Image (tube, rainbow, N blue to C red):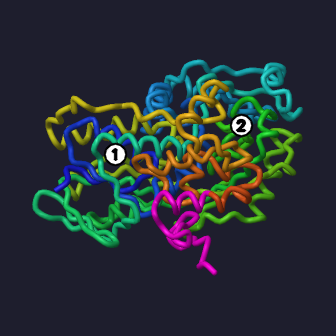
Amino acid sequence: MYDIAIIGAGVIGTFIARELSRYKLNIVLIEKDNDVSNGTTKANSGIIHAGYDAVPGTLKAKLNALGNPMFDKVCEELDVPLERIGSLVIASNKEEMKAIKKLYQRGIVNGVPDIKIIDKNEVRELESNINNNVVGALYSKTCKIIGPFELAIALAENAVENGAELFLNSKVKSIDKIDKGYRINMSDKSLVTKCVINCAGVYADEINNMVASPSFKINPRRGQYFILDKSAGTLINSVVFQCPTKLGKGVLVTKTVHGNLLIGPDAEDVEDKENNQTTAERLELIKKESKKTSEMIPFNKVITSFSGLRACGDTGDFIIEESKEAEKFINVAAIESPGLSASPAIAEYVVQKVKNIFAELQNKEDFNPRRKKVIRFMELSDEEKTKLIKEDSTYGRIICRCENITEGEIIDCIHRKAGASTVDGVKRRCRPGMGRCQGGFCGSKVVEILARELKKKPQDIVKESKKSYILTGTN
């Protein structure tokens, strides 16, 4: 019997798994897809919000404010890219400036440091390519950008290194209440556990309803994005938001932690929890809306577009509580924005609830908060590159010309704990296929390396899901 089963391996589930792996517990992390971070986490703006947006007194406000400063230590320990670039919420008229002032006051109440209202001239000093109509903005110094799926992958890896188990391709079909715990029935297996933590994202309500009567509903909200080439990445220096609406924070423009330009998302309520398609109509809307921020966005440099689903709850706040009808069943649901920003604080909050359930948790003396450093070949000095190639010649072979990724980096990401087994899994871990050609040149070579390293046939290597085959056979 496991002590704790965590359902869902997005950034929330992996963060909780990593924090609980500090203790002498038998932990299993269950994911329905064939990799971690395959849901909302992989289609995320990658922004660590300062914390001025959430309504004071909510869990969103409390945990965002607590979570933001925690990222520096976590990302240093796990070798995850993080950059503090600050943010602007821009206003184009007097009415929007009133909204900016309300956000400022909300930020003060939420305990957000280093925020201030600035005028048009100060905005243009920070962002020379901003729209001329901008009359002022709320400036927040503590806003950061991060690689969201890289964070979840690192968290899962560290959790497994510290004793947690990871079950992929394990969709939960039903949960039975049994003496002293639960039996979780999955696609091809079942397990028993004393405690369940439900981090199932857009499916969190369905998982809850397997053991208790409906107490909340998750409504998927789709957001679409553009990614522009790195040559456009210097257009904007900060995260630039428009004045928020009831549906979200509007279309943002930001550079990414890897130097691209990210534009989006829109906000569209959908019924299908797997509907993460992009549509020409909504992408055109994003283009139009983005002009409120800057007229100079070079959309001829778009290299890809994508969409993701946010798990919007019907309570207006995060749901983090033990079920009233199912003992030792903790829902961690409706984790929409600022969920990523709050994730380290959410994990600590859940750990406290677990401590209430288990009374005493014993620390592991050998817990290691650090994962093995990731070799990013192009960031090394010439001397370091030469030495590495002498030790391992695979680091001397460039596979992805757009991102300058070596074969050695790809092999490493495959053989790590919670390592890559798909083309997109490799892409998220070390970036081949993230550049201008989007895998047009390196994709076949990545398939070849995966097949060789995993001892599989090339036609058994998929792009993402089980059905996203690349090869159908050989001549």
Q: Is residue 181 visible?
A: yes
Q: Which mark is residue 259?
A: 2
Residue at screen point 60% across, 38% down: 47
Residue at screen point 60% across, 47% down: 407
Name the dominant secondary structure of the magenta segment.
Answer: loop
Q: Relative to residue 368, is residue 373 drawn left or right?
A: right
Asked if disc 1 and disc 2 are in contact, CB closer than 8 Å, the reply is no
Above or below 261: residue 188? below
Residue at screen point 76% across, 35% down: 95
Q: Amino acid at mark 2?
A: Gly
In the picture, the quarter occupied by the N terminus is bottom left
Q: What is the magenta range?
A: 446-475
Distance from Cα at disc 1 to Cα at disc 2: 30 Å
Let me know if residue 161 is in the magenta part: no
Residue under label 1: 160
Above or below 403: residue 437? below
Q: Is residue 323 visible?
A: no
Q: Which mark is residue 470?
A: none
Q: Relative to residue 46, is residue 175 drawn left or right?
A: left
